[in-house]
């Protein structure tokens, strides 16, 4: 049975959210989510990298690795592709938006090692998606990542103005908030 694009989109954004359900990409989720503007920039950068890497990874998988019988090289090749794309994004951001480049800081190069980006490229191949389905899946997953990042950043900004007991200030309240957000997203599991 052919999976519909609507099911891919809803499933990737809400039901199987890469951060809140699959727990991939936690480092940038916790690290960049202190301001909404920064998280929007990170979400856009991850969306661009995931979308582009999905196309390149799919083409490499089916036109190079499979014909040569070297599918076992998939992880290494995908990491190299992602690293190259992140370098391209870093160069573009430095030119186009120096303030966003500075705000993202160390987290921009960390997209290279973001397990969510690599995980999506591998999952797309494992699910045997066509090129278009894989692209839709990757972009939708990145949008789900960005959505979780922005919501969490908004919650963290709001928490700064609340009275939080001393023992829960900082990282503890952030982790509690993230877990509650993940539980809220689990409510979408009946959709698809």
Image (spheres, grey):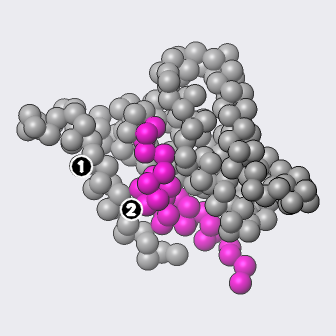
Q: Secondary structure at mark 1?
A: helix
Q: Residue at x 32, y 62 (%)?
A: 183
Q: Nearer the viewer, residue 67 or 72?
A: 72
Magenta-colored span? 1-29
**11 up-or-down from 107: above or below:** below
**Residue 85, percent across and down?**
71, 34
**Residue 31, percent across and down?**
40, 34
Q: Locate residue 105 relative to residue 95 in the image: left or right.
A: left
Q: Which mark is residue 107?
A: none
Q: Nearer the viewer, residue 154 or 116?
A: 116
In reply to whether residue 131 is colored magenta, the answer given is: no
Q: Residue at x 50, y 55 (%)?
A: 18
Q: Is residue 70 visible?
A: yes
Q: Is residue 96 visible?
A: no
Residue for badge 2: 185
**Residue 50, percent across and down?**
65, 45
For marks 1 and 2, the one nearer the N-term is 1
* Category of crowding for the residue at label 2, using alpha-carbon neighbours closer than 10 angstroms: few (below 14), some (14–19), many (at least 20): some
Q: Residue at x 62, y 43 (%)?
A: 47
Q: Identify the image quadrant of the N terminus.
A: bottom right
Judged by depth in the image, the label closer to the viewer, 1 or 2, is: 1
**Residue 102, percent across and down?**
51, 17
Furthest residue in direction bottom, as rendered: 1
The CA span between labels 1 and 2 is 14 Å
Residue for badge 1: 176
Q: Nearer the viewer, residue 39 or 84?
A: 84
Q: Locate residue 35 relative to residue 174 in the image: left or right.
A: right
Q: Locate residue 147 relative to residue 181 in the image: left or right.
A: right
* Category of crowding for the residue at label 1, using alpha-carbon neighbours closer than 10 angstroms: few (below 14), some (14–19), many (at least 20): few
């Amino acid at each position: 049975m052919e999976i519909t694009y609507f099911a891919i989109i809803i499933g990737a954004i809400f039901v199987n959210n890469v951060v809140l359900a699959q727990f991939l990409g936690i480092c940038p989720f916790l690290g960049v989510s202190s301001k909404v503007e920064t998280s929007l920039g990170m979400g856009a950068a991850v969306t661009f990298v995931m979308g582009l890497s999905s196309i390149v990874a799919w083409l490499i998988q089916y036109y190079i690795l499979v014909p040569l019988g070297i599918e076992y090289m998939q992880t290494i090749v995908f990491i190299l592709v992602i690293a190259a794309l992140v370098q391209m994004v870093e160069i573009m951001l430095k030119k186009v938006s120096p303030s966003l480049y500075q705000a993202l800081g160390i987290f921009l190069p960390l997209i290279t090692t973001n397990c969510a980006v690599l995980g999506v490229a591998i999952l797309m191949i494992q699910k045997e998606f066509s090129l278009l389905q894989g692209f839709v899946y990757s972009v939708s997953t990145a949008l789900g990542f960005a959505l979780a990042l922005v919501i969490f950043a908004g919650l963290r900004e709001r928490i700064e103005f609340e009275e939080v007991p001393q023992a829960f200030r900082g990282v503890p309240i952030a982790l509690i908030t993230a877990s509650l957000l993940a539980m809220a997203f689990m409510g979408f599991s009946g959709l698809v």
